[in-house]
Image: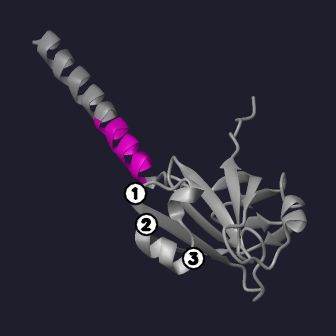
Amino acid sequence: MGVVRHFKRFWRFHSFIALSLSVSAFTLGCAVKEPAFFEGTWVVTEAHQPGISAVSPQQAQTILGRSLQYKSDRATLNQQQCITPRYHEQQFHLDDFSQYYRVDAKSLGFVPGKVTQVTIDCGLGAKDIGSTLVFQEDTTAYTVFNGTFYRIEKTLEVAPI
């Protein structure tokens, strides 16, 4: 009789531990929020001026190499800190995007499908480079400013050792 009692007590205790670990793993899995595609550090690599732009080609070249950083709680746009950014996301069909911006979206490298536009509001009123993003996940991304499309590329985040 002692062996059966010991066996029941053993499984009762271990099933409690297994249940606790399962509940913990489930709640932690639900609590982790995946960052938005655009969150991270981006570098301006090219300038495209498909139409009329308020920026000269020489001025546009001076923006190349600058970095933009987007996080849920802050952003850095053209070396200006945005302490409490509000992100507004909108999706366009490719044709609607072309009409809205008066540009051939395919010439920018977009493929048929939807294009996402994210505008960042820092409460300052004035827009700066990086305050409007347009992208298709895993293909092409740009920031649009004064009629110029600046191609941006996401940097890899390296975890500290």
Residue 135, given in percent of the width and then of the height, sits at 55, 60
In this rendering, the answer to whether 157 lies above or below 83 is: above
Secondary structure type for disc 1: loop
Residue 82, given in percent of the width and then of the height, sits at 77, 73
Where, quadrant-wise, is the N terminus in this rendering? top left
Residue 48, given in percent of the width and then of the height, sits at 71, 61
Q: Is residue 11 left or right of residue 29?
A: left
Q: Residues within 10 Å of mark 3 (few under 14, many from 20)?
A: few
* Residue type of the residue flagged with mark 3: Tyr
Q: Is residue 90 visible?
A: no
The picture quadrant where one finds residue 36 is bottom right
Does the residue at mark 1 contact the one at mark 2 (Cβ under 8 Å)? yes
**Distance of label 1 from label 2 (alpha carbons):** 6 Å
Is 23 in front, or is 49? 49
Residue drawn at the location 67% of the way across and 53% of the way down = 40
Please name the residue that numbered disc 3 is placed on.
101
* Residue type of the residue flagged with mark 1: Pro
* Residue type of the residue flagged with mark 2: Leu
Magenta residues (range): 19-30
Please name the residue that numbered disc 1 is placed on.
112
Secondary structure type for disc 2: helix
Q: Which mark is residue 94?
A: 2
